Amino acid sequence: MSSEFGNDFITVTDEDGIEYELEHLDTLIHNGETYMAFATSETADSDEVEVILFHVVEEDGEELFESIDDDELIEEIYGMFMERIDNPEEFQEDNG
């Protein structure tokens, strides 16, 4: 995903065939594993935006998103993403 022109959007389909548009917020690597944070789009019946975390795995050269089943890991990863969002100047990547 390129962030050259702002945040990226993806569409995911759940096991019931319902499609959701998600906005990519951030990607981080923790203990050698890649995680991505996405925000749901607002719906007509709700002003709430939900943050969804995925574990990224590569299979046959393709990135796949897996749900995270470990509650402690979810809390840890969520905390790391929130720290990055709250203090972006501490986590700026050197693009030069």
Image: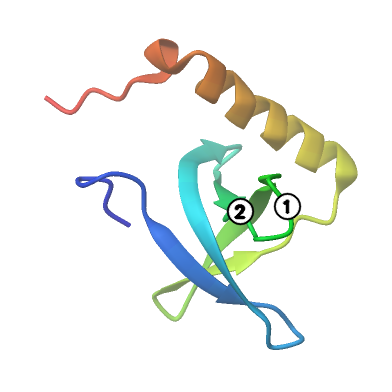
List the residue tagged with mark 1: 46
> Which one is in front, 69 or 38?
38
Mark 2 to mark 1: distance in Å?
Answer: 6 Å
Q: Which residue in the rendered view is the most extreme toward the left?
A: 96
- The residue nearer to you, when weighing 31 against 25, is 25
At label 2, the amino acid type is Glu
Image disc number at residue 18: none
Find residue 74 and report its horizontal and vertical position in percent: 78, 42
SS at circle 1 = loop
**Residue 77, quarter of picture:** top right
Q: Is residue 73 left or right of residue 87?
A: right
**Relative image position of residue 50 (x, y in whole percent):** 69, 47
Instruction: Find residue 53 and report its horizontal and vertical position in percent.
Output: 66, 50
Position of 3 with respect to 54 (left or right) is: left
- Which residue is found at the position 67% from the left and 51% from the top? 52
- Quadrant in the picture for the C terminus: top left
The residue under label 2 is: 42
| Callout 2–callout 1 Cβ contact below 8 Å | yes
Quadrant of res 55? bottom right
